[in-house]
Image (cartoon, grey):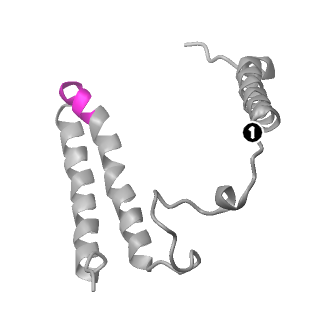
Amino acid sequence: MIASISTPSDYLPILLQFGLALAFVIAVMLITHLVGPKRKGKDKLEPFECGIEPTGNARQPYSVKYFLVAILFVLFDVEVIFMYPWAVNFKSLGMTGFIEMILFVAFLLLGFYYILKKGALEWE
């Protein structure tokens, strides 16, 4: 097997596509800024809350519980990303792949058990 050595010219199409995408984004933002309507007024500059009159201070701090639940959701939701390829290649991975997935799920369940014991999901 011959190992191929990548040269900087191999990355030219990627850089070109990135440059075109960036140029497109900048062009669209400039065009919408220049061509778009510029009607400013008292009603236009007020915050809009889905038709409900805004009340209170927008700078009130949120409880850390909201962020903790969001981070835990992402953490345990990402496991599906790892389980999907395993499920697709289940037969070709054999017993080794099955044991590895059992260990993966066991570690996740161990982490979930730790979170439950710490009371991270209990609301007051």
- Residue shown at 27%/60% (left/top)? 107
Relative side of 2 to 55, left or right: right
Residue 52 located within the stretch drawn in magenta? no
Secondary structure predominantly adopted by residues drawn in magenta: helix
Relative image position of residue 45 (x, y in whole percent): 68, 59
- Residue shown at 27%/86% (left/top)? 124
Residue 57 position by quadrant: bottom right
User: Which residue is disc 1 drawn over?
Assistant: 37
Relative side of 82 to 99, left or right: right
Query: Mark 1: which amino acid?
Result: Pro
Residue 76 position by quadrant: bottom left
Relative image position of residue 14 (x, y in whole percent): 70, 23
Q: Nearer the viewer, residue 74 or 87?
A: 74
- Residue shown at 79%/32% (left/top)? 35
Quadrant in which the N terminus is drawn: top right
Q: Which residues are magenta?
A: 86-92
> How many numbered badges does the structure rendering display?
1
